[in-house]
Image (cartoon, coloured by chain):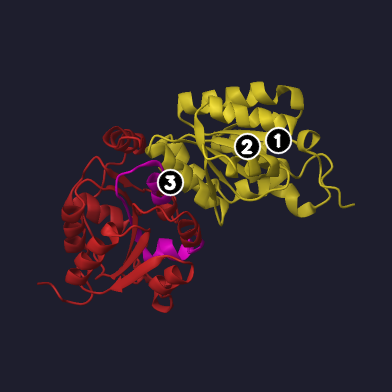
Chain colours: A red, B yellow
Amino acid sequence: MNTDTPADQYECTARLLSITPDAAIVSNLGVASYVLAGVEDRARNFYQWGSMGSTTPIGLGLALALDDPVTVLDGDGSMVMSLGALATVADQNPPNLTVVVWDNGQYGTTGGQPSASRTVDFAAVARDVGLAATHVSTTDDFEAAYADAVASDEATVVVCDVEPVDPDERPPFDFAHIKWRFRDAVAPSE
Amino acid sequence: MAWEADVLSVLKENSISLVVYLPDTALGGIIEAVEDDDWFTAVNVAREEEAIGVLSGGWLGHQRGALLVQSSGLANTLNAIGSLSKPARIPFLGLVSRRGDLGEFNLAQVPFGYNMPALLDTMGIRNHSLAETDTVARDVDMAAKSAFSTEEPYVVMLESTLIGAKDEY
C-alpha cells in the first residue's frame, strides 16, 4: 500500500508501465522524461527535449494514427502553457488516449519555481471542455485511476499530485534516433 | 475550386491523410473538402503550435500530415518547429496562406508575413512561394515528396496573387 500524499512519481510511472506494458508513451521535457527513462528506457517511449506545451498534442496525433493505447506524461508547467490543447483533444476524443498530468506544483527543470498549478484545477478544466478526468493524490489512487482511464472508451485525463523529484537519469539525447526507434516499434493501424 | 482540387489530389496521391488546420478563408475550400471526406483525418487545433505536435504524433504513428494555416499562424509554430520538427527530423507539408506582401492592407500581418520566407530560411526550413495557379499541382507534389523523403518539413507559401488579397481598403 502506498497512500502517502502526494504520490511518488517513480512508483506511479512503474505501475503505469505494468498496467500498459505496450503503450506508446510521449513524455514531457524534463522531469517526466527523466523519470520515465530511469524506470525503463523502452523503444515505445518518445521523450521531449524541447517543444514545451506540445506533449499532449503529440499524444493526440499518435492516438489518431495508432490502434495501440497511447499515454501522455505531461507536466503542470507544460499543461498550463497549452490548456487550449485539451479542447482539441476533447473535440477528437480518441478512445485509446490517456493524458497523465504529473503536478509537482513547480517548473522542475528550471529551478523549481512555483507554477500556476496552485490555482488551476486541471481535472475541472478538462471536464469543462468535455473530457473525462480524475484527480488523485496517492500512488495507489493513481494506479486505480490509470487502469480505469485505459479501460474507458474515451480520451481521459488523470491528474496526479506528485512529490517533486530531481532525477539523475536522462533519456538518449539523439532526437532522430529516438524517433526512429519509436517508429520501428509501433505498427500503423489498418 | 480549380487549384484547391489540385491540392486535394496531390494530398491523396502522396498518402497525406492527416490534415491539421486553423480556419482560414483562403484555405477554406481545401479545409471544407477535407472535412467532408472520410479518407482524411481532419484536426482543427485551438492554436497553431499544437498542430506541430499533432503532425509529429501522426508521423510517429506512420501517418503523413499537412499543416494548413495563415502565415501569422505559422509564426505561432516556430518554437515547436525549431525544437521538435527540425532536431528530430519529423516532416510535414506546410500549406500556408501568406499575408503581408502584395496587396496587404493590415500592418499587423507584415512583420511575420512579409518576412516569413527569411525566418524559415534562418531556421533551415525549406520553403517555396507559389504565385500562379498553373503550377500548383506540380509544385505542391514536389514539396510533399521532398518533405517526406528527406524527413524534414517543407512549407509552400500560397501568395496573394494566387489566393487573392483580402480587400478592406
Q: Is mark 2 on a helix, strand or loop?
A: strand
Does mark 3 fall on the same chain as mark 1? no
Question: As rendered, which of A39 and B83 lies closer to the eye?
Answer: A39
Q: Residue B158 carries which label?
A: 1
Q: Sort mark 3 into few (<14), some (14-19) or many (20+) by Cα contacts within 10 Å.
A: many
* Magenta-drawn stretch contains A137: no
| Residue holding disc 2 | B95
State whether residue B141 is above or below residue A80: above
- The reply to whether dot 2 and dot 1 touch (C-beta < 8 Å) is yes
Q: Residue A171 carries which label?
A: none
Q: Which residue does the image show at 21% across and 52% down from the upper left? A: A20
Question: As rendered, which of B102 and A66 lies closer to the eye?
Answer: A66
Stretch of the chain drawn in magenta: A59-84
Q: What residue type is labelled 1?
A: Leu
A113 relative to A143 in the view: left or right: right
Q: Which residue does the image show at 63% across and 49% down from the upper left? A: B73
Q: Residue A61 carries which label?
A: 3
Residue B128 seen in the current view: no
Q: Which amino acid does label 2 sit on?
A: Leu
Where residue A2 sits: x, y (%)?
12, 72
